[in-house]
Amino acid sequence: MHRFASDRRPPATGAGWASASLDHTLRGVLLMGNVWWHLLMVTVTIGTVGDTRVMAVLAGCHALAAGLFVAARAGRFPASVALALTWILFVADWAVEDSVDGALLFAACWSANLAAATPAFALRGRVAIWLPVAASLVMPPAMVLIHPDWNSVLPYAVAVTTLSILGGTRVGVSFLWDFAERVDAESSAAAAQARGLVAVRAASAEPAENARILHDTVINTMAAIASGGRGLRDTDAVRRRCARDVETVEDLEAGRPALQIGVLDKGDTVPGTDVRIRRVGLAGSALNRELADLPPAVQRAVSGAVDELLQNAAKHADVDEVVLEVRTDAQEFVVIVADDGRGFEGELPGDRGFARSVRARAESAGIDVVLTTAPGAGTAVALTHRRGTAPREKEPGSTGVAFSGVIRGLRVRAAWLYSVGLAAIGLVLCLSNHGGAWTPEYLMVAVLLLGSGLAWLEVRRAGRHRVGAVGVVVLALAAIVAFLLAAWSVDFGRENVVVWQAIGCTGPLVLLLALRRTQRAFQFGCALLVLTALTVAGLVGVESPEAAAVVVVAAAAALGLAIGWSLFHRTLGTIAAKVLREHRVAETARADTAKVEAAAAARQRWRSAGLQDVLMLLRGIATGQLDPADRAVRQACGDEESYLRQLIQLDPALVRMGDWYAQALRQARVRGVRLALRSGEVEPADDKTAAELGMEILRAVDTVESDEELTITLYPAGDGLRLTMVAPHPRLVPEATRWSLPEHADVAFLALGDQDMIEVMLRAERGMRWGLDQLDTGSEWKAGAA
C-alpha cells in the first residue's frame, strides 16, 4: 500500500542523474504513446463512423487531444487535462459506436487503458491517483446511461481495468525508482568523495609546492648567508636575491603564484653565486615557445626542479660551471643539468632538497627523473616530460558507477517488472471480465508466466542478463501463443471484443528486447506477431470484415506498445547521457569551488607560521640596513633557516591539523619551548575535532616552561586516534584537568619518572582520515628557541 500511495517521482529539479533520466524517459514515452494512439483513433474514426458530421467532430477532437499531449510533453500544457479529455472522448466513442464489438470502441478501450497507465509516469502528487480513480467512477455510470439496453460488462470492466492498471503501474514503477535512487545515492557519494579528494589535493598541493618554493628560495638564501664563504663575495647579488625572496614570502602569504620560469630562459650564472651556466640546445625565443606549449603544472615543476639542481651544483659540486641542456622533439621535452664535480655514491637521503624540490615536484607533474652520478665523476639529472602524459586527476563530476551498467540495469528491471505485472493484471482481468467463467485467457496467463520463468532460469543459470538462442525461441513462441489465446477468448474479434487483452503478448517481446545485446531477436518476435495477426485477420475477414479490423487494431495495440518500449530503451540512453553531462558540469563547478576554498584555507598555514621575522631580516639585507657578512646577521639567518626547515617538514596532506601545527611551532619558538611533533599524514576526520585537539596542543605549549621539551604524537589506534603529550613533571597534568576535550575522547594521565604524559583516545564515532600513504612514524618536527 505504501508503494501505491507514495509519490516516488523525483522533483522537477535537483534529482540525481539516474532518477531524472528515468523520469524524463518514462514521461516522454508515455505522453508520445498517447499522441500516436489518438492519431490512430483519428484513422479508425474516419474509417468506421458513417455520419460525416459526427465523424469530423470526433476525429477533430482526437486530433486535438494528440496536440495537447504534444504540448504536455513539451511542458506547455497540463498532462492531467489531456488525460481527462481522453476519458471524455472514450465516453464519446462509446456513444457514437453502434455495437459493443465495433473496431472504434475496441480502439477507444485501449486509448483509455493507455491513459490509465500514464499518471504514474507523467503526473506528480495526489492528482496522479485521484484523476484515474475519478475516471473509473464516472465513466461506467455515464456508459450505462448512454446505452442502458446494451447490458454489457464493459462499464464494469472499464472500472476494474483502470484501477488495476493504476495500481500495477504505481507499484511496479516504484521498484524502478528504488534502483534509480540507489544509483543516485552511490553517484552522489562517489561525487562527494571525488570532490573531497579534489579539495584535499588542492589543500595539500599548495602547501607542498609552497614548501618547495620556500626551500628553493628563502631557506637556501638563509643557509647561504649563515654559512658565509664565497656566496657573500658579491654583496649586491645577495641583496638582489633577498629582495626577490621578500616578494616570494609576500606572495606565499597572499596566495599569489610565487614561482616563475626562472633560470631556464635567462641568466648566465646560478642566482646568488658566480657559478656559470653553459647552455646547450634550445635557448631564447625557441625555448620560450616550447615552454609555452607545456602544461602549466609541468612548467612550474621543471622550473622549480632546475632551480634546485643548479643551486645544489653550485653549493656541493665544487665547480665553476654547470651545463643546462634543453632538447625536445614531438614526443618528449628533456632538460638535463650536469656538472663535472665531486659526485657521490648511493642514493640521496629522502629528506634532502633533491627529494623534496626535484623528485617529488617532478613526479607530481608526471615528469621522469633520472640521476646519474659517481664519486669524482660529476652528477647529471635528466628531467623528461612525455607529451600527453601529464597526470590527470579523477574527473570531479564522475559518478563512480558504470553508466552503461546503470542503463542496462534500468532496462532489464523495467522489462521483468512489466512482464510479471502484465501477467498479474491479466489474471485479474480474467476473473473480472468473464464473471469467473473459464476462457483461454487463463492459458494466456500461464503461457506468459511459463515463458518468463524459462527465460529467468536461463538468465540465472548463465549468471548474466542475457538469453541465448533457446531463450529467444521460447519467448517469441510465448508471444505468438499468448496473442492467439487472447484472440480465441473473444472468438478472434467476433464477440465481446472490448475485453480482449490484446497487449498480453507484449511481455515476452519486451524481455526479448531487454535480454539480448541487439534488437534482432525483438524484431524477429515483432515480425512473427505481425505475420500471425495478418493471417488471423485474413482468415476471419472472409466472413466478418469488422472482426478483421478488430484483429488489426489489437495487433496495432500490441505492436505499438512493443515499439514504444523500444523507444524507451533508446531514449533512456540518450536522455541519461545528456542529464549525466549536465550533472558532471555542475559537479565540476562544485569541485572547482571546493578546490579554491580548500587552497585558500591551506594558505592559513603560512600566515599562522609567523613569517614576519624572516621578512624583516630579508628586507633589512635587501635595503642595505643589514650587512649579510655581519656575524649577528648570519646567526639570525641560521636561526630562521632552522625554523623554516622545521615548518616545511609539516606534511602537506594535513589539511585540518597543518594550520594548528604551524601555530604550535610558532608559539613554541616564541616561548623558547623545544617542541617535537610526530604525526605523519593522520588527522581527525572533521574540522571540529581538529580544532579541539589544536587548542589543547596550543595550551600544552603555553604550559611548558622555556627551554623545556614537549613531545606531541598523533597516531592511529584501532579505528580511532590517539594523542599523547609528554612534558616534564608537573607541567601538563594540573592544567590538563581543566582542558575541554572532544566529547568522544577518553583521557588518561600517566607519570613516567620525571615526565608527565597525557593520553587522549579518540573513539571511532567521528572517525579519522588517512592521507595518501600510511603513517610515517619516523616523521618528527622540532621547534626550539631561535
Image: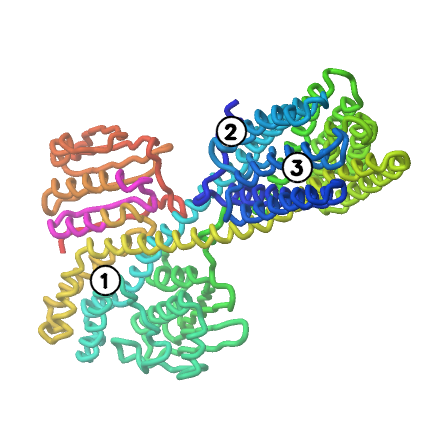
Closer to us: mark 1 or mark 2?
2
Q: Amino acid at mark 2?
A: Trp
Q: Secondary structure at mark 3?
A: helix
Which of these two is toward me, 407 or 326? 407
- Residue 6: x, y in percent? 48, 29
Front one among 728 and 398: 398
Residue drawn at x 38%, y 43% as measured from the top left: 770
Q: Would you say residue 663 sits in the magenta stretch?
A: yes
For label 3, the residue is: 111
Q: Is residue 581 above or below residue 704?
A: below
Q: Residues within 10 Å of mark 3 (few under 14, many from 20)?
A: many
Residues at circles 2 and 3 in contact by the CB criterion of under 8 Å? no
On whether residue 79 falls in the magenta region, the answer is no
Q: Residue 130's mark?
A: 2
Image coords of residue 249 (percent x, y): 22, 65
Point out residue 17 in the picture as x, y percentages from the top left corner.
Answer: 50, 45
Looking at the image, which is closer to me, 211 or 749?
A: 211
Tag 3 or tag 1, which sits nearer the N-term? 3
| Residue marked by disc 1 | 254
48 sits left or right of 86 in the view: right
* The magenta segment: 662-689
Q: Label 2 vs label 3: CA separation?
A: 19 Å
Instruction: Tell me the quarter of the picture where residue 224 sits.
Output: bottom left
Using residue 655 as the reference point, say whether residue 31 is left or right of it.
Answer: right
Disc 3 marks a residue whose amino acid type is Ser
Gap in angstroms between the C-alphas marked 1 and 2: 62 Å
Residue 345 as seen in the image, left or right of residue 129: left
Which callout, 2 or 3, points at the residue further toward the start of the chain? Answer: 3
